Amino acid sequence: METGEQAQDFVPAGLASLGIEADEVELAVMQAAHSMFWPPIRDLLSMDLGGLQAEHDPDLSRAPEEDAA
Amino acid sequence: MRALDLSLRAQAAGIAAGEIDAGELLEATLERIEERNPAINAIVETFPERSREMLAAAPAGPLHGAPVVVKDEWPLPWRAQKFGAAQLPVPVQPTPAESGPYRALRDAGAVIVGVGNMHELGSGSTGNVSVYGAARNPWDVERCPGGSSSGPAAATAARLVAGAVGADGLGSVRFPAAYCGLTGLKPTFGRAAMAGHHMAATTSLIVSGPLCADAADCRLLGSALFGEAIPAGDAAGLRIGVVRDAVSEDVTPEVREACDEAIEGLRAETGGSVHEVELADLEATTLAGILIINAESLDGVTPELLNGLDPKVSPINRGFVKYRMLLPAAAIVQAERVRTLTRRRLAALFADVDLLAWPTIPAAAPPLDAPLVELPSGTQTADQANVRGAALANLTGIPAISVPVGLGEGDLPLALQLQGAWGADALLLDAAEALERANGRRWVEAWPPLARAEAAET
């Protein structure tokens, strides 16, 4: 689990590494977004999807070509 | 009833039959916009001379002479889109152009009378943030009209026009349709005109779609956007799938009751059947949609561009567009795998049912100044709560439609969402019309207070 301190560090450290400037309000927005999105992102990354490979350049106007998983 | 209070199809039919003067209808529409728009801020720009020129040159198409509004998400030949923002976070700012929706409407004979407000950068389901100021809900001007297609919905609900074109990347046609008591179609991905959108080349989620009072008008306007007629059927024997899980059930009691009643009405009207089905990992599906649309919006974005962002962009969006740069690439890859998994699951599911039904919005329109909703799971922002029911269709490409199914506390609209298999746009419209028949068209003919008083006088 990411500790609160790590979460506090993630946004400013990430921005600094990319050279992106942010004021206090923007930082507060980003901290809130990070708190909201990071736990489910971690869950997503932990999902066991077996050997599933994403469709390459899928035609989203149609059903997938392969049968149901 | 005055011509400008008629349905879109009645306006077009009346003009075609010589019973309505299209020039008079246009001028009456422009007058009504002047009268009513200040209360709802739905239309951010009109251009009467351009509209008159469009009418003068309009071909004898299915929408000949019918006034419509287009969301601030596509360019017009005389105006670049602003996307509801002081600046788009893209390398090259848009310029005036003939967009796909413009050409589709022009070729169908429609007359664009105004540009509809929208939630800034398309990034919210409420419509309360915009460089033009918030749009307001005609049912209660202190409530959110929904977003991001806030202006097209509010304009249509207030009967400024009978139809409008919105865009839907994560529910942005369906939310405002639901909040404003309209019918809104999110077409199958790729079917409706999109050219000229600043993300047209990169998006795998955003589509244009019609917002109208009812399904028949959506069929007419949608046909123009599709470039081909959407055929009508009867939806007989409809197999309706319902999902009972945390996402679809975490709604207010009035929403649950209205949607359950509507589903039963639809079943009875079509002689169909209701089936409880399972669709696993809906929360991951929602997150996948959010991650992918945000990743796709980063095309060409650089730190320098973000550092130079116009300070008039709202703080929440200035912060969020910068946060996008920190999203982990591995999560985007995983989101694509979830998309594939979900598409396969849906393909299997649509072998057993014709459509899925669940609430479009978990609660009625929240206040503009505090867009929060009270759900069984607790208080949430409307954005957090709304997106859970919408992302599936955008992520997978399937069509979806929001249909009004009641008025809740405070006379605020409630809505049911129907989702079908790829290419089943016509079936969704058929089902929406069957639902209208089932409830005696009570909800598609319910008018908000802003439009009701004058209609009663004429």
Image: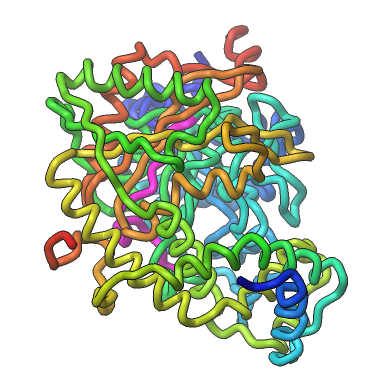
- Of B13 and B246, the residue lying toward us: B246
Residue at coordinates 67% horizontally, 63% vertically from top-left? A35
Residue B341 appears in the figure: yes
B191 up-or-down from B37: above or below: below
| Image position, residue B445 (x, y; %) | 46, 17
The image quarter in which residue B286 lies = bottom left
Residue B190 falls within the magenta-colored stretch: yes
Q: Examine the structure image and report whether residue B384 is included in the region drawn in magenta.
A: no
* Picture coordinates of residue B316, whole percent (x, y): 75, 61
Residue B362 falls left or right of residue B89: left
Number of on-image labels = 0
**Residue B257 picture quarter:** top left
Q: Residue at x 81, y 78 (%)?
A: A22
Magenta stretch, main secondary structure, is: loop
Q: Residue at x 60, y 23 (%)?
A: B412
* Residue B161 appears in view: no
| In-image side of B394 versus B138 (left or right) | left
Task: Tell me the magenta residue range.
Answer: B182-197
**Which quadrant of the rendered structure holds the C terminus of chain B?**
top right
Classify residue B312 as left or right of residue B223. Answer: right
B324 or B450, which lies in front?
B324
Q: How is the image coloured?
A: rainbow
Residue lying at 32% horizontally and 51% vertically, measured from the top left = B280
- Residues B73 and B392: in front is B392
- Furthest-right residue in view? A24
Residue B219 percent coordinates (x, y): 31, 38
Q: Is residue B314 left or right of residue B263?
A: right
